[in-house]
Image: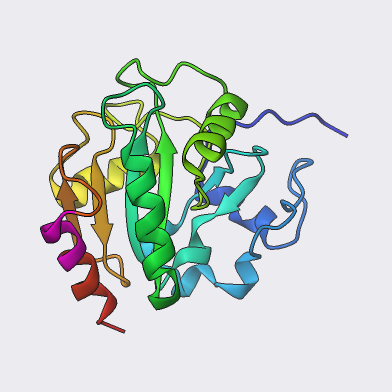
Amino acid sequence: MTRVSFTPWITAALLVAMAGQSVHGVTPAAGATPVAATPVATCVPLLRHSFLRLQDEKPQALCQYSGKVLVIVNTASFCGFTPQYAGLEALHAKYRDKGLVVLGFPSNDFSQETGSNKDIADFCENTFGVKFPMFAKSSVTGKAANPLYRQLADQSGSAPRWNFHKYVVSRDGQEIISFGSNVAPDSSAFVKNIEKKLLVK
């Protein structure tokens, strides 16, 4: 079997593999939601990507989060804003049953995430008890930014300027509100924006 090396993100072309087929030696990821359960035709365009899960580097289709309100955040382990992990996890736990999902994207774009994916996963779990989905380290700014973050920047008009920049995305993926790093996960304006989007079914 041909050995396949994955980059931290995988484009939508590999969603076929996630549907249960094998493409160039790529087999569906264990525990991944099959694309068949969320057809690409009904998946919001913003989520038509697949990324490697942080903990085991197995591909995960973002289409599984279609129809959810999303908080998408670029993270780092050695930043003054790193304690926001605790607030993000609390937010995820509080509103998960109402349709919120927090998605974390570690990045070394600001030179504060130097460890391996395993190092990052261990740090997040052991230090902050992070349970929300997180993905392998990738770039979130500039020309090297992963495709999701390029779309987020284009649609919101704002790219991350530092770690823990947050995007709140509506269920249909059409409305994206950008919040800077200094906006805490429990801040009134941030939480109210999330609650407003959760009311829209």
Front position in the image: 142 or 23: 142
Quadrant location, the C terminus: bottom left
Q: Is residue 124 above or below residue 197?
A: above
Scheme of colours in the image: rainbow
- Asked if residue 115 lies left or right of residue 183, the reply is right
Front position in the image: 74 or 64: 74
Q: Is residue 162 above or below residue 45?
A: above
- Asked if residue 105 lies left or right of residue 191, the reply is right
Residue span colored magenta: 187-192
Can I make out residue 46 in this image?
no
Residue at x 17%, y 65% (from the top left corner): 193
Can I make out residue 110 in this image?
yes
Residue at x 28%, y 76% (from the top left corner): 198
Residue at x 41%, y 52% (from the top left corner): 89
Residue at x 79%, y 41% (from the top left corner): 25
Q: Residue furthest right?
A: 1
- Is 99 in the magenta? no
Residue 11 at x, y percent in the picture: 51, 44
Residue 150 at x, y percent in the picture: 29, 40
Quadrant location, the N terminus: top right
Residue 101 at x, y percent in the picture: 41, 61
Counting labels gives: 0
Q: Which is the main secondary structure of the residues drawn in magenta?
A: helix
- Is 191 in the magenta? yes
- Asked if residue 180 lies left or right of residue 168, the reply is left
Q: Is residue 196 above or below residue 182?
A: below
Front position in the image: 14 or 109: 109
Residue 33 at x, y percent in the picture: 64, 64
